[in-house]
Amino acid sequence: MWGLATSSFRTAADYAWLVERFLQHQAAQNIRYSEAFFSPQLHLGRDRDLTPAQLLDALAQGAQAGEAVTGSRVRFLVDLDRSRGADDTAEAALQFALAGQARDGLFLGLSIGGPEQGYPPEPFADLFARARAAGLRTVAHAGETAGPASVWGALRSLHAERIGHGIRALDDPMLLDELRRTQTPLDVSPTSNYCLRVVPTSQPHPIRQLLDAQVFVTLNSDDPPIFSTDLTNEYCTLARQGFEWPELWQLNVNTLEASFLPEKEKASLRQQWQQFRQSVGE
């Protein structure tokens, strides 16, 4: 499904439209800022006429147009397909991220995604080391469909600053201790976990257990079109499972603190959020 969806985008206008529509969707949920993943390995190659520079132009155009209309901003992280290994396309993706970084920070960092089973993070250590040396931030999808070893690898080999999912950390008390000590954010996406049957739909999501263990957790929507969700739905899911307003608000605050925004911008948003919270009587 994912490959079919990405294959439908062919021209620069397609990509600019996609980013603009994404920001419209985010703004409809009152999302002011997003850090979204983009996988250049799926969008560059012999079956595409776009050069990397043209693709970056299109993404920048869509981001600028969408922000002008909606007030919602987006910055990107290059997401490597771990199933391809650290091959020439992964190297090209890193160079794409660096070129995007040079465009007023349009690209912020490097990540790995895709199937965990059989594709550990360790082979990507050199790519991530070079990304960090160049000032890119680092994120890794780990601990959703594979166990704690996947998370340990992301932390030790990739020095990931955030972990996508990470719920399998609950299987390893030592890993929980490490996450609690370092306060490394786990970007948790309940609907994704339910759809992939990582968590049985008959059970409450284990995000509660992570919070009880004093792990730093944020709430996310993963792939909204594929899983028929959005961020609002993720909050509603937790509310139906007994989360109360102060807990949901704290998850919202956690997301701001875990973002890669400069501190000055975080401070401005903190002030706006505090004013909103006071306005609703909380």
Image: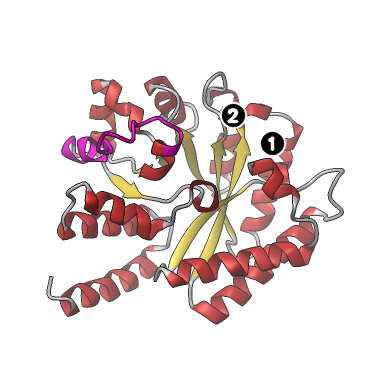
Residue drawn at (41%, 29%) of the image: 143
Give the residue type at disc 2: Phe
Q: State the image coordinates of residue 274 (x, y, percent, origin top left).
A: 22, 72
Q: Nearer the viewer, residue 141 or 126?
A: 141
Which residue in the protein does label 1 denote?
90
Which residue in the protein does label 2 denote?
124
Q: Is residue 120 left or right of residue 38?
A: left
Residue drawn at (46%, 71%) of the image: 27
Q: State the image coordinates of residue 88 (x, y, percent, origin top left).
A: 76, 33
- The numbered disc on residue 73 is none
- Picture quarter with the C terminus: bottom left
Q: Which quadrant would residue 62 be assigned to in this image?
A: bottom right
Q: Please tell me how many numbered marks the rendered image carries.
A: 2
Q: Are marks 1 and 2 in contact (CB under 8 Å)?
A: yes
Say how the picture is coloured. Answer: secondary structure
Label 2 Cα neighbours within 10 Å, binned few <14 / some 14-19 / many ≥20: many
State whether residue 257 is above or below residue 191. Answer: below
Give how far apart the Cα atoms at labels 1 and 2 are: 9 Å
- Whether 148 is among the magenta residues is no
Residue 225 visible in image: yes
- Picture quarter with the N terminus: top right
Magenta residue span: 195-213
